[in-house]
């Protein structure tokens, strides 16, 4: 019973949104100040935890600094 109810809510909600779209507002704009700030904040704390984890675990496994630097450089390239 419950999976069918959830699936029907999902389909009905998608149809309602498709047929009656919301009017654009400042907060729905992806370039608003709050959105840009929170996205940059989220990337900053994510990478501040991810970079040390990746570097330490890769160095412990590989025992070589060059592949670790390549992996970290690829993460920094993805960021841009």
Image (cartoon, rainbow, N blue to C red):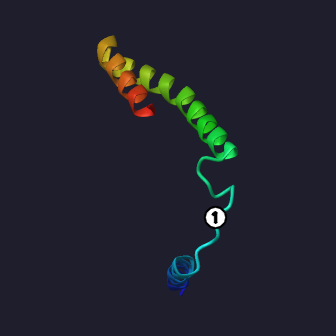
Residue 57 sits above or below residue 24 on the image: above
**Relative to 67, is 10 on the left or the right?**
right
Element class at badge 1: loop
Question: Splitting the image into 4 quarters, where does residue 17 fall?
Answer: bottom right
The residue drawn where x is 53% and y is 82% is 19
Q: Is residue 57 visible?
A: yes
Q: Nearer the viewer, residue 34 or 62?
A: 34
Q: Nearer the viewer, residue 25 or 61?
A: 25
- Judging by the rendered image, the residue that carries numbered circle 1 is 24
Q: Is residue 64 visible?
A: no
The C terminus, quarter of image: top left
The residue drawn where x is 58% and y is 80% is 20
Residue 15 sits above or below residue 79 on the image: below
**Relative to 29, is 63 on the left or the right?**
left
Residue 73 screen position, x and y as percent = 37, 22
The residue drawn where x is 32% and y is 20% is 70
Residue 74 screen position, x and y as percent = 35, 27
Could you classify mark 1 by the number of other residues whose Cα lies within 10 Å: few (under 14), some (14-19), or many (20 or more)?
few
Residue 13 sits above or below residue 59 on the image: below
Tally of marks? 1
Q: Nearer the viewer, residue 34 or 47?
A: 34
């Amino acid at each position: 019973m419950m999976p069918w109810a959830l699936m029907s809510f999902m389909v009905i909600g998608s149809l309602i949104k498709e047929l009656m779209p919301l009017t654009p507002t400042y907060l729905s704009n992806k370039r608003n100040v709050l959105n840009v700030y929170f996205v940059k904040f989220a990337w900053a704390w994510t990478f501040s935890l991810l970079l040390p984890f990746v570097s330490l675990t890769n160095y412990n496994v590989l025992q070589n600094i060059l592949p670790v630097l390549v992996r970290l450089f690829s993460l920094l390239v993805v960021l841009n």
